Amino acid sequence: MSASTETAAAFYAEEPFRLDFRTWMMILGVMLAVVLEILDTSIVNVALSTMMGNLGATVDEISWVATSYIVANVIVIPMTSFLAGRFGRRRYFVSSIALFTFASFLCGAARSLPELVVFRVIQGLGGGALLAVGQSVLIESFPNRQQGMGQAIFGLGAMMGPMLGPTLGGWITDRWTWPWIFYVNVPLGIAAGLLCWRYLPTPRALARRDERPDWPGIALLVLGIASLQILLETGHRNEWFESDWIVTLAVVAVVALVLFVWHELHTEHPVVDLRVLRHRSLVVGCVYGIAMGVGLYGSVFLLPLFTQQVLHWTSWQSGMAILPSSLATAIAMPIAGRFVWRLGPAPIFGVGAFVFLPSLWGMSHWTLQSGWWDLFWPQIGRGVAMGLMFSPLSVATLRALPPRDVLQGSGLYSLFRQTGGSLGIAVLATMIDHRSTVHYANLAEAVTPFADATRLRLGQLTAGLTMRGLDPSDAAAGAQQMLGATLHAQSAVLAFRDCYLVLFCVFLLLVPLIPLLRRPPDR
């Protein structure tokens, strides 16, 4: 038997499943780090307006607080396998936690926007390792038939982080000040680092410290990924390709990424081994990872906008509206993990997809009169669907890989999921503005002074304002303003309807790929 075969056999051996104290402590440390990393992607969003006033920044300037973290994150994720192999997995993982924690403290202590953006970049560079390494650790910690439960544990952090971020961020900002959004990471980060340093093992299969760094590959990766991510994050604010800046970013991203792919396929020791994509399970998983990113981050992005801008709820009410879906995910994910190996990934993922589709359809029918319970059940459906889809997809994607490819595959899988989230948010943000304008123009064509319905409505509004004591001329002007506000609100509702229908179509088109999610072999 060859050495590689012995390694694979040991890795996939089905020993009696038992989690001892050391393993539980390791899982606790890893998942604490994963939750902190993902939480910081969205927790700052609700505090940006407060930061604008304290730091004297414009909307475009303050947006870099969120963008800089995500860009740094996405740059590091695909390099995780190389860096873990070069420095040792435990040393690299714990050092990343320490860097993330220290940068969190610096973010809270920042007194100017440039300082905060620089510290957020450092925080993102530290946090980028936590997703891919954390998922690969859980892949290695559970035997085949318990992989669903292992990925359910990881999924609880990966899926609930974006959902709980706005709620937790709004609560902290309302009761304290925005620096505490970053300060809360410090004690939790220290605890995660100590647990991982004490209990996280380093597999010898990753040792490859004699390899020379692939500096051309690193440079092309940084340039291409950073340009693409900045394009997705700022394109909406810059009118997309009407801006020379966005055109330049697009050209740089395409050229750099094409050269990066060519270089990585022709170098002996690539920083990102793209040959791992020879595994069909990883390719299918990455395609669905993009859709999962679009569905998760896109739906989480749309709900606060709809509740606050259309229904005029407070940030706290909006955050509480997300909470039921988070609880539904927390309940559904262990159930999926329990049965994924027994039933296979495809059936459970299929159930999740067919729950998600009617949930999106229900979201597309929200109106100006929608209340808490109208939003509640579609959100429950979305939470259950995400819980049922995450574990089967992760198991089918990563468990089929050979041991030496797990960390590299996990990095690419996380990269596609994160990029899908950024792409979904960019497209949906543009759609809301564009479709609102289109729908307003269409509605305004029908609402003319010559239409009987328009005259009747204006008459009712004018009479109501006159009864409140307004002068008839002021009442008529007020009635026209109220009618215009109604048109704007209704056009926004229709724009959100279009966005949810786009998400519906994305998942509907991917349904034929479900049979490709096959059970990994018992090796």
Image (cartoon, rainbow, N blue to C red):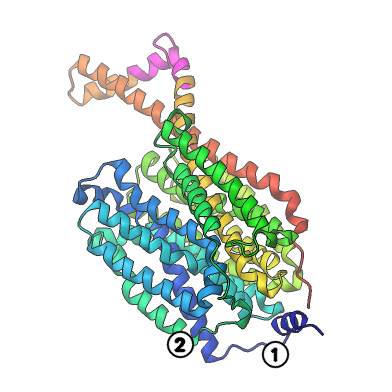
Residue denoted by label 1? 16
166 vs 434, left or right, is left
Type of amino acid at the residue the image marks with label 1: Pro
Which of the 4 quarters of the picture holds residue 456? top left
Element carrying mark 1? loop
Question: Which numbered disc flags the more N-terminal residue, 1 or 2?
Answer: 1
User: Is 100 above or below relative to 10?
Assistant: above
Within 10 Å of the Cα at label 2, are there few (<14), some (14-19), or many (20+) other Cα atoms? some
Residue sitting at x 77%, y 80%: 5
Magenta-colored span = 443-459
Residue 351 is one of the magenta-drawn residues? no
Q: Which mark is residue 198?
A: 2
User: Is 48 above or below relative to 122?
Assistant: above
Separation (CA) of disc 1 from disc 2: 24 Å
User: Is 151 above or below relative to 117?
Assistant: below
- Whether residue 232 is visible here, answered yes or no, is yes
Which of the 4 quarters of the picture holds residue 491? top left
Foreground residue, 129 or 304? 129
